[in-house]
C-alpha cells in the first residue's frame, strides 16, 4: 500500500494523515520523480506488434537525435514509417525535458495518427512516459547497438546529414534552414511511393 501511495505525491499527501505512525515521527518520503520512473521501465521493440514492421498501416513513428561535434545543440527527428514523412526540431540542449517538449510539439498536429513511436536508448528519451501520456500513444525502444531496428529513421538522418554534416555547428543552422530541409525531404519523390512524395502520400 505504501508503495502505491508513494508513486504519486498528491495521493501520498492526501492519505498521509491516516498512515500509522507506530510511535515514530514521520520521515519525509519523497515520491519518485518522473525521470526516475522512466528509467525503471522501457518497453522493448520485441513487444511491438509485428504488423508495424510491414509498414501497411500509418501512425507508427521512429525518433532519434542528430548531434554536432561543434556545440551542444542537436536536432530531434521523427519519421512516419509508412509514408516517410519527417519532422525536425531544434534542441538547445539534448536533455530529456527539452526532447520531450519538442517531440510533443512536433507530433501534436498529428496526434490522431501517432499510434506508436520507437526510439533508441539515449537518455534524452527518459521522459517517454510523459510523451505517451500527452500523445496517447505507445513508446518502444530498439535494442542497444541495433540501429537497423529503426532503419527508416537512420536512413532519414543520413539524408539530413547531406545538408548538415557532423562537422557543422547546429547552432549556426537557422530555423528557416531547418524548415527548408524538412520541406525538401517531404516533397522529394520516392520510388517506393511510385514517385509520390511523403507529403503527397501522407495526405492521400
Image (cartoon, helix red, strand yellow):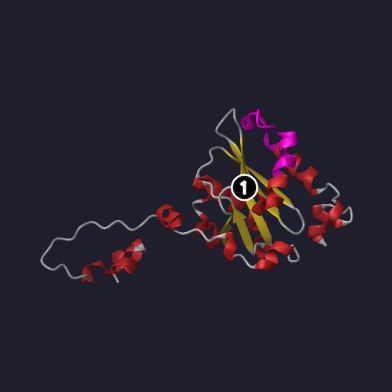
The residue at the point 68 percent across, 46 percent down is 154
Residue 150: x and y in percent read: 66, 52
Q: On the rendered structure, is 97 left or right of 168?
A: left
Residue 91, relative to residue 133: is it above or below? above
What main secondary structure does the magenta stretch of the protein show? helix
The residue at the point 74 percent across, 62 percent down is 55
Instruction: Name the image quarter holding the N terminus.
Output: bottom left
The residue at the point 62 percent across, 31 percent down is 171
Relative to the observer, which residue lies in front, 181 or 194? 194
Q: Which residue sits furthest left?
A: 23
Residue 65: x and y in percent read: 61, 43
Q: On the rendered structure, is 91 left or right of 110?
A: left
Q: Tell me if mark 1 has few (under 14), some (14-19) or many (20+) residues whose alpha carbon lies within 10 angstroms of its own.
A: many
Residue 88: x and y in percent read: 67, 45
Relative to the observer, which residue lies in front, 99 or 175? 99
In which quadrant of the rendered view does residue 10 lie?
bottom left
Q: In the image, which residues are magenta?
A: 157-176
Does residue 135 appear in the picture of this structure? no
Q: Which residue is the site of mark 1?
A: 64
Relative to the observer, which residue lies in front, 131 or 193? 193
Find out whether residue 111 is within the magenta segment. Answer: no
Find out whether residue 173 is within the magenta segment. Answer: yes
The residue at the point 63 percent across, 51 percent down is 63
Image mark count = 1
Residue 144, relative to residue 72: is it above or below? below
Residue 2: x and y in percent read: 28, 68
Amino acid at each position: 500500500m505504501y508503495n502505491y501511495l508513494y508513486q504519486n505525491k498528491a495521493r501520498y499527501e492526501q492519505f498521509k494523515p491516516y498512515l500509522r505512525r507506530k510511535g515514530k515521527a514521520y520521515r519525509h518520503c519523497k515520491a519518485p520523480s518522473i525521470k526516475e520512473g522512466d528509467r525503471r521501465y522501457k518497453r522493448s521493440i520485441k513487444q511491438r506488434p509485428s504488423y508495424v514492421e510491414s509498414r501497411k498501416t500509418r501512425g507508427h513513428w521512429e525518433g532519434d537525435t542528430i548531434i554536432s561535434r561543434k556545440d551542444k545543440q542537436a536536432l530531434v527527428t521523427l519519421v512516419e514509417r509508412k509514408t516517410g514523412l519527417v519532422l525536425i526540431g531544434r534542441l538547445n540542449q539534448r536533455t530529456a525535458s527539452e526532447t520531450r517538449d519538442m517531440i510533443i510539439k512536433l507530433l501534436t498536429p498529428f496526434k490522431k495518427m501517432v499510434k506508436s513511436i520507437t526510439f533508441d536508448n539515449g537518455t534524452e528519451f527518459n521522459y517517454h512516459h510523459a510523451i505517451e501520456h500527452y500523445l496517447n500513444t505507445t513508446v518502444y525502444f530498439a535494442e542497444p547497438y541495433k540501429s537497423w531496428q529503426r532503419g527508416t529513421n537512420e536512413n532519414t538522418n543520413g539524408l539530413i546529414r547531406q545538408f548538415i554534416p557532423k562537422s557543422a555547428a547546429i547552432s549556426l543552422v537557422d530555423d528557416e534552414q531547418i524548415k527548408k530541409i524538412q520541406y525538401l525531404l517531404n516533397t522529394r519523390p520516392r520510388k517506393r511511393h511510385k514517385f509520390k512524395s511523403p507529403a503527397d502520400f501522407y495526405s492521400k
